């Protein structure tokens, strides 16, 4: 997968996996990483799907309606890419914290829904429930931070509540931060994510 890897000063820190929103690239979330951890390594990935030229991490049939077959295929593809990248860049595969926005948060959520040890933790900005028809793997001791908009037109508040419940039912340690700025990724939610990260890593 097309990506950027930047080795951090402190190799004991988690590697931050950056996952952009629809129409973004692997450059988009780079400025965010130092707010979370300025000494961590960064792996920023571009989604392999193109929707009218806009990169995404999996296909959708309509706004908010996901192509589940493609979601499963692309989640596996990303999962395998993480294994390869860890070998190639010599970082700890078991110490990856995802930071995703919108479609990138959805594929990060999908990693948690499909694989037990895919992520050490996750910061999900404006995620949706990736799919509703499976039992999640056990996520005991996986901390998850969700930033959501009470008035998000793309991701209704109930979607966030459902995602929190599904992850908690799988024993993940979930914290939800609410905002009132629609689907926007705001500075205040990044600051809240940074506080959460300090507590857990
Ligand atoms: C998705 O398709 O993943 C969500 O609707 C969010 C987005 O527009 O990227």
Image (cartoon, helix red, strand yellow):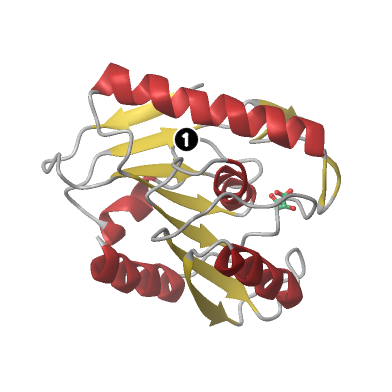
Q: Determine whether 62 is above or below 83 in the image.
A: below
At a point 62% along the width and 34% down the height, the residue shown is 75
In this view, the residue in front, 178 or 118, is: 118
Q: Is residue 110 left or right of residue 7?
A: right
Query: Is residue 53 among what the camera can see?
Result: no
Q: Determine whether 7 is above or below 156 in the image.
A: above
Residue linked to disc 1: 26
Q: Determine whether 106 is above or below 173 in the image.
A: above
At a point 82% along the width and 38% down the height, the residue shown is 67
Q: Where does the image place residue 70, in percent across and percent down from the top left?
A: 76, 31
* Label 1 lies in ligand 1 vicinity (Cβ under 8 Å): no
Q: Is residue 162 left or right of residue 3?
A: right
Q: Where does the image place residue 71, in percent across and percent down from the top left?
A: 72, 36
Residue 83 location, quadrant: top left
Residues packed near mark 1 inside 10 Å, few (<14), some (14 to 19) or many (20 plus): many
At a point 15% along the width and 44% down the height, the residue shown is 12
Query: Is residue 164 among what the camera can see?
Result: yes
């Amino acid at each position: 997968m097309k990506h950027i890897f930047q080795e951090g000063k402190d190799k004991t820190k988690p590697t931050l996996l950056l996952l952009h929103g629809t129409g973004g690239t692997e450059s988009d979330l780079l400025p965010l990483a130092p707010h979370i951890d300025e000494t961590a390594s960064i792996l920023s990935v571009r989604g392999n799907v193109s929707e009218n030229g806009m990169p995404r991490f999996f296909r959708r049939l309509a706004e908010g309606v996901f192509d589940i077959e493609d979601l499963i295929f692309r989640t596996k593809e990303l999962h395998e890419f993480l294994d390869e990248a860890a070998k190639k860049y010599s970082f700890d595969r078991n110490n990856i914290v995802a930071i995703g926005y919108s479609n990138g948060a959805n594929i990060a959520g999908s990693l948690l829904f499909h694989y037990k040890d895919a992520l050490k933790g996750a910061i999900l900005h404006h995620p949706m429930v990736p799919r509703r028809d499976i039992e999640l793997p056990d996520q005991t001791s996986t901390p998850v931070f969700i930033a959501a908009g009470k008035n998000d037109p793309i991701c209704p508040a109930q979607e966030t509540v459902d995602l929190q419940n599904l992850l908690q039912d799988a024993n993940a340690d979930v914290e939800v931060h609410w905002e009132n700025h629609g689907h926007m990724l705001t500075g205040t939610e990044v600051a809240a994510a940074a506080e959460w990260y300090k507590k857990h890593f």
